[in-house]
Image (tube, helix red, strand yellow):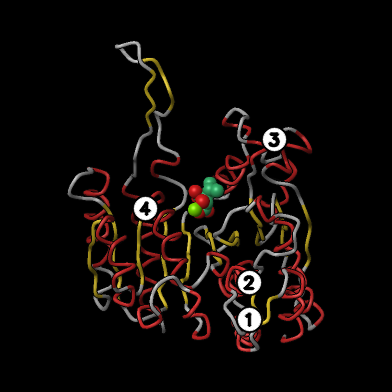
Amino acid sequence: MKIAVLPGDGIGPEVVEQAVKVLRILALDGLPIEMDYAAIGGAGYDEVGDPLPENTLALARAADAVLLGAVGGPRYDALERPLRPEQGLLRIRKELNLFANLRPVRVYPELAGASTLRPEVVTGLDLMIVRELTGDLYFGQPRGIHINADGEREGYNTMRYAESEVRRVAHIGFQIAMKRSKKLCSVEKANVLETSELWREVVIETARDYPDVALSHMYVDNAAMQLVRHPKQFDVILTGNIFGDILSDEASMLTGSIGMLGSASLDAASKGMYEPIHGSAPDIAGQDSANPLATILSAAMMMRYTFGQDEAADRIERAVSTVITQGLRTQDIHTPGHQRVGCAAMGDAVVAAL
Ligand code: IPM
Ligand code: MG
C-alpha cells in the first residue's frame, strides 16, 4: 500500500499529520502501508518554482493512492496562473485521470446543532455528491483574457464535455447509487446550456444499464435551493465539475462545517487521491485550530475505495464517531457545553479511539 503524502499549504500539513497518525496505527496493526512525502501547490513553487514538481508527479504516479492536504495562499495570488498553487492541484487531477470525485455529506447526530440550518432539516442526512473532476469549464479550451473588437478586455472559458467523459462518471454515479438507496439525481442546466443538454442525454442513455435506479434531473439553481430547503430528498447527486464544486461547498454546511467533509478522486482503476474538500485556510494556518476530521475521513475513504479494506475504513469512521460522541470539538464545530480541542489533540483522540 504505497501512499504519496502531499501536505501542501496553509492548514494542509497540520491536518495531513493527523491522518498520517491514523494510518500509522493501521500499519502497526498489520497493514503494509508505506508513506512518502512530496511538495505540491505553493510548497512546490517554493521548493522548485513549480506547483506540481516533477518528482511529486512521479511519486504520485508510482503510488497506489495519494493523500493531499490543501493548496493555496495569499502569497501566491499574484503569480501568473500556471505557477499558482491551484494549478498544481488541477494538473495532478488531470495527469492521474482522476475523473470521479466522491464527496459524501453525512451529518453526525451530535453535530446537527452545529449546522446553520435547523436540526430537523439536517438530522439523519446522508448523501453522496459525485462530481466530474477533469473536464468542464476548469479545463475547456479556448480560455483566456484578450482584447476584443471593441478594444475592451474580455475574459472567456469554455464549458465542454465529450460524451465519453459524461458516460464514465455517470457509470460511477449509478454504481454508487446501486450500493445505496438506488436514487440518483443528475444536476445540470439543460434549459440554458448545450453542454448540459448533452450531459442529460448521456445520463439517460447510461441509466438503461441500471434499471433499478430511480433517475431524476434537476437544474443546478433549483438544486442549490433544494439542498437547503429539504436536503434529505437527495441520495446520490451526479454533476459536472463547476456545479459540483459549488454544490459541495454548500452541502458541507449541512454537516456543521466544511471541516467534516472528505473526498475521493478516482480513476478508472480505483487509484485515488484523497483530500478534504476544504481549502488551505491561511487565516488559521499554524495555529493548531483546524479540524483534521475531513482529512482523517479521507484516509478512511482511501482504505475503502483504493485498498478495498472496508474493515479499516469502518474502524476509522467509528473512531471519528467516538470522539464526536465524547464531545470533542474543534472551533469550527464547537457549540456550548462541549470540549474545545486543537487540531493535534483531535488527531490524538481519534488515534486513542482507534
Ligand atoms: C475543491 C477546490 C478546488 C476546485 C480549487 C482549490 C482549485 O475548491 O477541490 O473543491 O475548485 O476544485
Ligand atoms: Mg471547492
Image position, residue 293 (x, y; %): 63, 71
- The residue carrying pointer 1 sits among few (fewer than 14), some (14 to 19) or many (20 or more) residues within 10 Å by Cα, namely many
Q: Is residue 130 above or below residue 77?
A: below
Which residue is denoted by mark 4 in the rendering? 243
Give the residue type at disc 4: Phe
Image position, residue 54 (x, y; %): 72, 39
- Marks 1/3: CA–CA distance: 35 Å
Give the residue type at disc 3: Asp
For image coordinates 42% across by 65% down, the residue present is 251
Q: Which mark is residue 50?
A: 3
Left or right: residue 206 versus residue 168 is: left
Residue 102 seen by the camera: yes
- Marks 3/2: CA–CA distance: 29 Å
Which residue is denoted by mark 2 in the rendering? 293
Give the residue type at disc 1: Val
- Marks 4/1: CA–CA distance: 29 Å
Q: Foreground mark, 3 or 2? A: 2
Which residue is denoted by mark 1 in the rendering? 320
Asked whether disc 4 touches disc 3, contact meaning CB atoms under 8 Å apart, the reply is no
The numbered mark, 3 or 2, whose residue comes first in the sequence reads 3
Q: Quadrant of the N terminus?
A: bottom right
- Marks 2/1: CA–CA distance: 7 Å
- The residue carrying pointer 4 sits among few (fewer than 14), some (14 to 19) or many (20 or more) residues within 10 Å by Cα, namely many
Q: Is residue 203 above or below residue 165?
A: below
Q: Residue furthest left?
A: 191
Image position, residue 19 (x, y; %): 71, 69
Asked whether disc 2 touches disc 1, contact meaning CB atoms under 8 Å apart, the reply is yes
